[in-house]
Amino acid sequence: MLDLARLQDQALEKRPIDLGALTREVLADFSPSALDVGIELSLEHPQGSVVVLGVEAAVRSALANLVGNALIHARGAARIVANLDRGSVSISDDGAGFSPASQLSEIELFQTGAAKVGHGLGLSIIREIMTAHAGTLTITSTPARGSTVCLSFPEAPRARPRCSRNQHDLGRGVLE
């Protein structure tokens, strides 16, 4: 709750974050729990890095909440997959899923999933993190087929190549 209050009352100093490396770390943190319940964790990652703007601790918290929620609430799941794409990460499971009618209530503060485990803070905290990052939280689920939660962030600007000694940046072109 304290993290949620801090996000709501504070301007965030966003920096480039390697979303792939951070996702790998979070999955590694949850590997023992996944092994205990017989769920495979995996990462699908495109070539190259996925760099977004954000506050690393907050993004880590969002990812940890997603993976933790999937482990707790994905009844019948055999696999949880993190999929990285340009500026986004999604966490998908092949569990029981939930009905479209319950998708909106799942992100309300103090609402728990069908497992009735936890305090109902996870998805509402993630929503606040994404709002603070000018990003989006998207939830899709199909009963008996599983759920996917996608976090989309503003991408970090690509580093501009350094000019050689003989070049001067004029804003529109290069004078040699």
Image: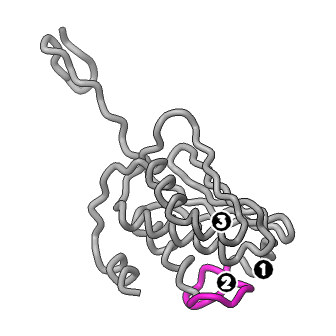
Q: Secondary structure at mark 3?
A: helix
Question: Is the residue under label 1 in contact with that under label 2 (CB below 8 Å)?
Answer: yes
What residue is drawn where x is 30% and y is 53%?
15
Q: Secondary structure at mark 1?
A: helix
Identify the image quadrant of the C terminus: top left
Residue 171, image quadrant = top left
How far from the left and from the top, in percent, is residue 128? 46, 74
Q: Is residue 108 left or right of residue 172?
A: right
What residue is drawn where x is 53% and y is 56%?
152
Report the magenta stretch's main SS: loop
Q: Secondary structure at mark 2?
A: helix
Residue at label 1? 101
Query: CA gap, disc 3 to disc 1?
Result: 32 Å
What residue is drawn where x is 37% and y is 80%?
3
Image vertical order of residue 159 relative to residue 42, above or below = above
Q: Is residue 66 left or right of residue 102?
A: left
Image vertical order of residue 136 relative to residue 158, above or below = below
The range drawn in magenta is: 104-119
- Colour scheme in use: one colour
> Looking at the rendered structure, which numbered label has been put on residue 35?
3
User: Which residue is outermost to the right?
Assistant: 144
* Residue 105 magenta: yes
Q: Is residue 15 left or right of residue 130?
A: left
Point out the tag, 3 or 2, that comes first from the N-terminus: 3
- Amino acid type at circle 1 is Ala
Residue at label 2? 105
- Amino acid type at circle 2 is Ser
